Amino acid sequence: MTIDFKKQQAVAGLEQLATLVRAQSWRQDGTPSLPPTQSAVLRMLDGAAVPLRATQIAERLGISAASLSDSLKALDAKGWLIRTADPADKRASLLGVTEAGREIVTRLNDPQQGIAALMNGLNEQDVGALLRVTQLLVREAQQKGLATGPRTCLGCRFFRPGEGNQPGKPHFCAFVQQPFGDSELRVDCAEQQPADEKYAGESVLRFRQMNSQ
Ligand code: SF4
């Protein structure tokens, strides 16, 4: 099966951006060059309300336990992880991030550096368009078994696409009972609860229909 020229261009663009992220060679602020999995783990642990098990991290990132294990070892060696005993399972430990690790996350999130700097040139409509496409790509990845963990609006049982009924806020979140716009779509929401397959499929249909209206 082949894809058409337009999609080939989209693929080329995404691959170029992914290469840019991997290389991180354009960071000028001295922040260590981190492989994407390591920075994703640090960001996740920094943003988590409670320490997480390795299995939860691997599931959210959609990677194997073995791949995660290498990243955890590397982060441990840098002194950026805290491990505590899991009271619910003597064989498992809970993972958090040290102060030094938090400093790295702050630098990774610096809006003047790294991929965050690329966002400065986008307006709200652009960000909304990017988040819409991201929702759909994550959904495709989930359906192909490439990712199970991302906690997107499109995969959430509280998501009501098209029910916002306010200018610029076409969606509704039944968890916080608020309408919201494309630029507020979440890719990693702590309150997300996965929708069942039937509901998720219907959400995708409604979400796509809104785009073609
Ligand atoms: S709970 Fe979070 S993921 Fe779910 S619809 Fe609301 S904002 Fe989106």
Image: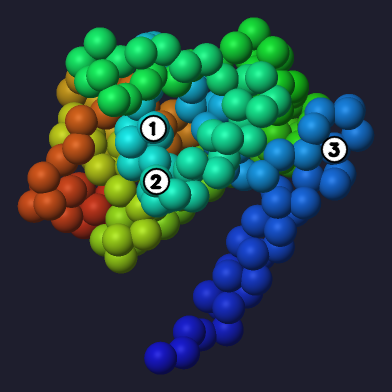
> Cα distance, mark 2 to mark 3?
29 Å
**165 to the left or right of 28:** left
Q: Disc 3 or 1, which lies upstream in sequence?
A: 3
Residue located at (44% from left, 49% from top): 66
Q: Position of residue 145 (x, y in %)?
A: 30, 61
Query: Where 64 sits versus 118, above or below?
Result: below
**139 to the left or right of 188:** left
Q: Quadrant of the N terminus?
A: bottom left
Q: Disc 2 or 3, which lies upstream in sequence?
A: 3
**133 to the left or right of 98:** left
> Which residue in the protein does label 2 denote?
65
Front: mark 2 or 3: 2
Front: mark 3 or 1: 1
Q: Give, as a three-letter code, the residue at label 3.
A: Arg
Q: Position of residue 185 (x, y in %)?
A: 40, 34
> Which residue in the protein does label 3 denote?
27
> Which residue in the protein does label 1 denote?
54
Image coloring type: rainbow
Q: Secondary structure at mark 3?
A: loop
Q: Give, as a three-letter code, the residue at label 1.
A: Ala
Is residue 179 visible to us here? no
